[in-house]
């Protein structure tokens, strides 16, 4: 049972269930709702600050969200038992980032935020339907393909960052290019992010069937949110490229 999402690695559910209360799919769904509610509240704050002209506040919140989110994600990934305590703070940190970035895009392209939000949840529902009806089957080859594609994307983003920051090179990999090649690359990345949702659904279902400890509901919700936030940002980027 593997997934490309580092938050839902194969080792995550290899834990001894010492209590009587176990992980359920409904419980994970409830936790996911709580996390997205926290993310929405946090994102609304930075969104309002951005359009109120408080640029210094927004910049500070963006940096705080990036640093805090990264640290909390690492802690949660490596110590799943703390997920009930770190997941909500992580969602709040991600909200600060999402709100700031969404505001920046909205200022350039009116209506883009609602478009990206609707498409993100639309993709999630489609992938959930495809998974439940077994239109998409999670086989070994399917997992391996998604994991390799996700790893390649992460390496490409890292390479682009290094080339820009340290060498001042332009977008040689076309990841941020608004031309036809850049748009096709973004479409491919969105597809890979969407396929990660299928792996996440499969991982959570199997964790529930294996009677993982109750705290894994928070961990599963955290991992699912990681993928959905990534998907939203990639859809936001894709729409902006098309509208340019």
Image (cartoon, rainbow, N blue to C red):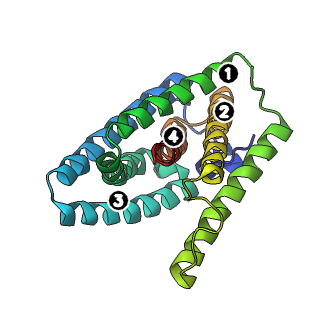
Residue 130 image label = 1
Which residue in the rendered view is the most extreme toward the right?
141
Visible residue check, residue 95: no
Identified at 31% across, 40% down, the residue is 110
> Tags 1 and 3 in contact by the CB under 8 Å rule?
no
Visible residue check, residue 101: yes
Q: Residue 144: where, in percent of width, then height?
A: 81, 46
> Tags 1 and 4 in contact by the CB under 8 Å rule?
no
> Tags 3 and 4 in contact by the CB under 8 Å rule?
no
Identified at 78% across, 27% down, the residue is 137
Indicate which disc, 1 or 3, sits on the residue closer to the N terminus.
Answer: 3
Residue identifier under label 3: 65
Residue density around tag 3, few if under 14, some if 14–19, many if 20 or more, within 10 Å: many
> Tags 2 and 1 in contact by the CB under 8 Å rule?
yes
Q: CA distance from mark 1 to mark 3?
A: 33 Å
Residue identifier under label 2: 198
Q: Is residue 51 left or right of residue 1?
A: left
Indicate which disc, 4 or 2, sits on the residue closer to the N terminus.
Answer: 2
Residue identifier under label 4: 228
Identified at 55% across, 59% down, the residue is 176
Q: Residue 146: where, in percent of width, then height?
A: 74, 44
Q: Residue 109: where, in percent of width, then height?
A: 35, 44
Residue density around tag 4, few if under 14, some if 14–19, many if 20 or more, within 10 Å: many
């Amino acid at each position: 049972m593997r997934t490309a999402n580092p938050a839902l690695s194969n080792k995550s559910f290899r834990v001894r269930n010492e209590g009587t209360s176990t992980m359920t799919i409904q419980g994970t769904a409830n936790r996911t709702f709580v996390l997205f509610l926290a993310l929405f509240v946090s994102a609304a704050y930075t969104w309002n600050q951005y359009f109120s002209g408080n640029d210094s506040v927004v910049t500070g919140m963006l940096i705080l969200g990036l640093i805090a989110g990264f640290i909390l994600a690492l802690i949660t990934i490596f110590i799943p038992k703390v997920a009930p305590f770190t997941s909500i703070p992580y969602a709040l940190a991600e909200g600060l980032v999402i709100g700031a970035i969404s505001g920046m895009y909205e200022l350039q392209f009116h209506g883009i935020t609602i478009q990206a939000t609707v498409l993100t949840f639309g993709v999630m529902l489609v992938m959930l339907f495809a998974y439940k009806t077994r239109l998409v089957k999670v086989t070994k080859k399917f997992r391996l393909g998604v994991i390799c594609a996700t790893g390649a994307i992460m390496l490409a983003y890292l390479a682009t960052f290094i080339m820009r920051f340290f060498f001042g090179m332009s977008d040689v990999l076309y990841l941020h290019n608004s031309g036809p090649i850049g748009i096709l690359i973004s479409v491919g990345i969105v597809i890979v992010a969407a396929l990660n949702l299928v792996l996440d659904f499969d991982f959570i279902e199997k964790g529930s069937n294996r009677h993982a400890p109750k705290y894994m509901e928070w961990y599963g919700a955290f991992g699912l949110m990681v993928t959905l936030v990534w998907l939203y940002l990639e859809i936001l980027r894709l729409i902006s490229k098309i509208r340019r």
